[in-house]
Amino acid sequence: MAAKTKSLIIVESPSKAKTINKYLGKDYIVEASFGHIKNLPKSKIGVDVENNYSPTYVTIKGKGEVLKKLKEKAKKVSDIYLATDPDREGEAIAWHVAEELQPVNDNIYRVLFHEITRSGIREAMNNKRKIDDKLVYSQQARRIMDRLVGYQISPFVWKTLYYGLSAGRVQTVALRLICERTEEIERFVPVEYWSIIGQFKTDTSKDFFAKLVKIDGKSKQIGSEENAKSIVREIKKQSYAITHVQKKDIRRNPAPPFITSTLQQEAASRLRFSTKKTMTLAQRLYEGVDLGDEGSVGLITYMRTDSVRLSDEAVAAARDYIYSNYGKEYLPKEPRRFKKAKTSQDAHEAIRPTMLEHEPKKIKKYLEKDLYLLYELIWNRFIATQMQAAVYEQLNVEIEGGKFTFRASGSVIKFRGFLQIYDDVGSNGQDDKEKDPTSPIPANLYVGQEVNLLDILPKQHFTKPPPLFNEASLVRELESLGIGRPSTYSLIISTILERKYVELKDRQIHPTDLGRQVNKLLIEHFPDIFNVKFTAAMEDELDTIASGKQSYKKVLDDFYYPFTESLEMVSKKTTEIKKALQEETGEECDDCGRPMIIKWGRNGRFMACSGYPECKNTKPLAHEREHLKQVVSNTACEVCGSEMVVKGGPFGAFLGCSKYPECKNTKPITLGIACPKCREGEILERRTKRKRVFYGCSKYPKCDFASWDKPVMQACPSCDNAYIVEKYSQKKGQFLKCPECKNEFDPDEINIARQASG
């Protein structure tokens, strides 16, 4: 019998297998598990609580052939190396694979590929180990917590609202944050305040602006127009002179290298990528991209990390690159290190390029556009971390007259430093504040110099509520609260979108009516389970399993027993809760005369006959019908010529023939706007697979018109394009824009606000 000389390496994805195979050569066989091979069963809870929370795992449908192939390969090799992803999820996959292969070959080792490069693979193979049971149990505990919540609370939601809804342990907390932010905005009462800007000039200088900052040496809120006018009158009576001039250098250091959350935030802000898209592209960059003659190459380190740590080799390579490409003045004397967060597990390096020979512009031809943009972002951020600080010269000038103090501030860049490659100003996704008039501050101003007041500019403002979450700011909030971990942020957002609990409009996350109702129901009856602090504490508890400080059973006991007590109490009141949610309408059913009640469907609330299932009549709520009638009045059925009427159903409002059931013709409700491309169809609202709203022609696929922004049938005043679109930004609010010439318009200025609202 021939000796077994080859080794088997098992990774998760075939693309990673291809890259690794290139480096290891003929003595290794590299195969893929295609992710998880086992999971808890879909048809039952699959957890034996009485037997120390023992899970029942089943082979995932379609993975039988994968396992069969792996077993055949395992029989013919000397050693098996499990190189699934270097995190808890990867450890669990490795554990499941090992269980299946041990009967045929028990020479099994675990290796961690933090980067798919020759040196990274060599280092991993030299540091083989056994599977870490603590990491496996930590991942399993999370999975079981989620299963216990999902499989025991979801039926409660079905019984009280409608079948098919679900509740998740962490996703519900994210939904809660979104709903509470929206409610805070709705409750917000704007407060009026005024700013006062003075326009000044010396005898020898150009004019410049300064802001009123103090009255009688104290900051004062100006709360009304009357108060502002009174102050302006007093200001005009004074003579002014410069009382303070300060010039100083300000240093601004580069941001740390990317971790998972900051990569998702920056890609959302700069590139407008969803968290899911960012992680999908990052996975491809990590696993390997075909670079022509060089073959498949892993371009970045592992992308699920909460650590800002960089290896000494990577830092040295970055410093060499900076010296060669930017000069010694851009290189700090010592390498820059970044302080890790208290909550960081520090299991992996930060996200960085694997090899600096693969400069983005050199390999651009091998990368599709979005893959290139993300790689360039990671590259630039990494190089910037080891560059000199940017230096600004800041000038502050104070002007006094009587009891009034004005201040002018400005800055100019003296040395760009890291900004030469990575300008991060304004890229954090925060709102831009309202800016007052500014102008350069003249040089050579000095204390005691008299200045002339040329003009005074009072301006009204109103305080603003906090902004709605977008994907980037929600990730930032989850991270700051300790909710979820790097591998879960994208999944959390994707899940609540897919469940239709939230929707994206203008890149902002809005809770749907259904999402609000589910949130209200769960928070009211399970306040401790879906509590932000409790959920964050459970994340810490899971970490204690991984570190060995607490046992698997102890952590699950601490979670499960309070959970079951709450569940038992609520389950006794299900009928009462459902009845409390049911609303009478005061309307009678058009078909049978019985009372109509309000029910919940997949797209929100609608009216249904209380005689269901004998009578299945449904229609939209009264206020929706009134709005829709304006759009669809006098619409005739194309089949029989009868009047079409607005109907409702679990998937929203639609037009149905008034002669139903004799005529069953239906059609979607459009915006009542002619398609600007074909002029035959009408524009209607559609949704992508990720539930993002867009607008398309009712004649699709004959007409392929599509727009992310809502079209308005108004010719562009600038270029006569047939239509313009509605836009929204946190800085500008609601405005209109021409998709052709890109000019922007105020709705009120061109008198189309009524038409724009549809």
Image (cartoon, rainbow, N blue to C red):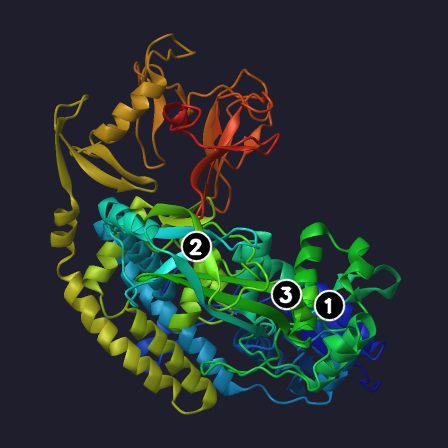
Q: Quadrant of the N terminus?
A: bottom right
Residue 440 falls in which quadrant of the image? Answer: bottom right
Disc 1 to disc 2: CB gap under 8 Å: no
The kind of secondary structure element at disc 2 is: loop
| Identity, as a three-letter code, of the amino acid under mark 3 | Ile
In depth, the one of 254 and 739 nearer the eye is 254
User: Disc 1 marks which residue?
Assistant: 299
Q: CA distance from mark 3 to mark 2?
A: 21 Å
Visible residue check, residue 140: yes
Which residue lies at the image location 51% right of the left edge and 44% below the top edge? 689
In depth, the one of 58 and 329 nearer the eye is 329
Circle nearer the N terminus (1, 2):
1
- From what the image shows, is residue 97 above or below residue 691? below
In depth, the one of 417 and 234 nearer the eye is 234
The kind of secondary structure element at disc 1 is: loop
- Characterize the local packing of mark 3: few (<14), some (14-19) or many (20 or more) Cα atoms within 10 angstroms: some
The kind of secondary structure element at disc 3 is: strand
Residue 404 falls in which quadrant of the image? Answer: bottom left
Circle nearer the N terminus (3, 2):
3
Residue 142 falls in which quadrant of the image? Answer: bottom left
Which residue lies at the image location 22% right of the left edge and 33% below the top edge? 607
User: Disc 2 marks which residue?
Assistant: 433
Residue 375 point in image, percent of width and height: 69, 62
Disc 3 to disc 1: CB gap under 8 Å: no
Which residue is situated farthest in the right direction here?
293
- From what the image shows, is residue 343 above or below residue 614? below
User: Disc 3 marks which residue?
Assistant: 413
Circle nearer the N terminus (3, 1):
1
The nearer-to-camera label among 1 and 2 is: 2
Which residue lies at the image location 30% right of the left edge and 64% below the top edge? 219
